[in-house]
Amino acid sequence: MKQRVRNAISIICKFILILVSLIFSLSLNAQDIDNGEGLSCAQYEFLNDVFGKYSDKQEKVYYQPKNQEIWINEFLTFKSDIGIGTCIFNEGSLEEAIEGLNKKEFLTKSYERKKLPKRLKPLKEPSERSGLHISEPIIIDSYCFLFIWEKSYRAVEIYHFEVDDHWKFKCFALLSGEL
């Protein structure tokens, strides 16, 4: 009888351990999607692909979360029936992605420094440091919108995720200044 009780307790303990492990694993995956607290895996992959060690951009880049709604509203004022900035709407998916910016809700997100490429230097406070600054990348479908600025200009760069599993620069819209 004692042996049966021990076996039952052992089985119950194993079941509880498996259940706890499963719940923990599911909660990690759920956090990775886009819960408004931290950058998603896709955003980290974009930053590493565009600004990582294989990037042709060599200068230091400052990562600084910005109020997304402000620059998006300004960006959308440049939209016409044929395109936006240097982007031409010859494919419906880009226009749909740009329209998706209107529907997106934005929360200030944190980031994990160790997941960012070494060239990106996070800044928590607004800074007048010279050099290129970038905001949080916004990914909609296979497009990524990135607000960039230096002292002389502000622009939105648009990237497309290509079939070779890399992000490629597609076009941009100059919001102010000169390149």
Image (cartoon, grey):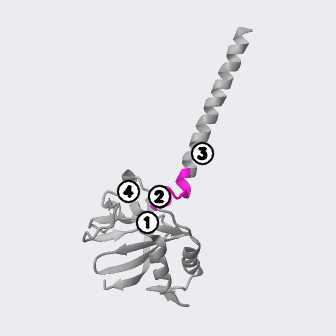
Distance (Cα) linking label 1 and label 2? 8 Å
Q: Residue 52 carries which label?
A: none
Who comes first in sequence, dot 4 or dot 1? 4
Q: Mark 2 points at which residue?
A: 39
- Kindly state the secondary structure of the residue where label 4 is placed: loop
Who comes first in sequence, dot 2 or dot 3? 3
Q: Residues within 10 Å of mark 4 (few under 14, many from 20)?
A: many
Question: As drawn, is 41 to the left or to the right of 18?
Answer: left
Q: How crowded is mark 2: few (under 14 residues within 10 Å), some or many (20 or more)?
A: many
Give the number of the mark in front: 1 or 3: 1
Who comes first in sequence, dot 4 or dot 3? 3
**Cβ atoms at labels 4 and 3 below 8 Å apart:** no
Compared to residue 85, the image places residue 158 above or below, namely above
Figure label count: 4
Distance (Cα) linking label 2 and label 4? 10 Å
Q: Mark 1 points at which residue?
A: 136
Q: What residue type is labelled 2?
A: Leu
Q: Mark 3 points at which residue?
A: 26
- Kindly state the secondary structure of the residue where label 1 is placed: loop
The single residue placed furthest to the top in the displayed view is 1
Who comes first in sequence, dot 2 or dot 4? 2
Distance (Cα) linking label 4 and label 1? 12 Å
Q: Which of the pair 177/124 is nearer the observer?
A: 124
Q: Identify the residue shown where x is 61% and y is 39%.
A: 22
